[in-house]
Amino acid sequence: MSLLGDDILTMRKHKYQRVYNFECIMPLVGIADPIKISRLVQSVNYVDYEMNEVDGMNYGAFQAFFAGKFKKRPFSITFLETEDHDVKRYLNAWRSLMVDRHGLYKKKKGFLFGYAKPIFINYLNNSGNTVNVTRFKYCFPIGFSPWKLDYNESGLQKIEATFVCDKVEEVRDLLANPIEDFVTAKVPEFVPKLF
């Protein structure tokens, strides 16, 4: 008898995550509508963490390995672009939060004016209910895909933006309503409530 069990019906009881059942919740940047930008997201590609270097130690004739440093690779988000160039303006507004017109860097953290902002991935089940939330803390864009204009194609214009973040974490306490909690949660006392 197999250690995993011989009842194949147990595998049919699992509910599997579908690749299209997600929402990407983009942060408030400038005067752009984050909900409108979030609806333009087509795909998200990310790796939580990876360990490129492993520490090793020799003792006698044997060798043992120990965990090294975790590294986070940049992740990408692909947007559909509108005729009004909403995504391009949104990303350019985010870039202006990083560097001013004189070329000086601005403050990284801050509720309204910091350039490092959270991005949420809201995983949904087949009924459309939230089953998991992943938060990318302190994100900012580092690059955008080139514009592809071609008379030989009739597809939609897409923009792929590359982001970096300080931390990726599962957020179980936001399962009730991540959009509402994100907008209203942990606003500093000196900032007037916008909503």
Image (spheres, rainbow, N blue to C red):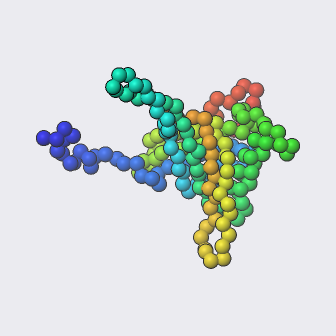
Q: How many marks?
A: 0
At which x and y percent is residue 104? Answer: 82, 39
The answer to whether 21 is drawn above or below residue 65 in the figure is below
Q: Which residue is located at x 68 percent, y 38 percent? A: 116
Q: Is residue 10 visible?
A: yes
166 or 113: which is nearer to us? 166
Residue lying at 73% horizontally and 46% vertically, measured from the top left: 94
Residue 145 point in image, percent of width and height: 65, 57
Residue at horizontal 13%, vertical 41%?
1
Whole-percent x and y of residue 53?
49, 35
Outermost residue, left side:
1
Indicate left or right for 62 with 110 as reference. left
Which residue ends up furthest to the bottom in the rendered image?
Answer: 152
- The single residue placed furthest to the right in the displayed view is 102
Relative horizontal placement of residue 147, taking residue 169 as reference (left or right): right
Q: Residue furthest top?
A: 59
Quarter of the rendering containing residue 192:
top right
Instruction: Name the quadrant of the C terminus.
Output: top right
Visible in this render: residue 23? no
Which x, y percent locates residue 81?
66, 61
**Residue found at x 72% / y 25%:** 189
Tell me: residue 180, above or below residue 145: above
Q: Is residue 134 above or below residue 91?
A: above
Q: In the visual, does 187 lie left or right of 47?
A: right
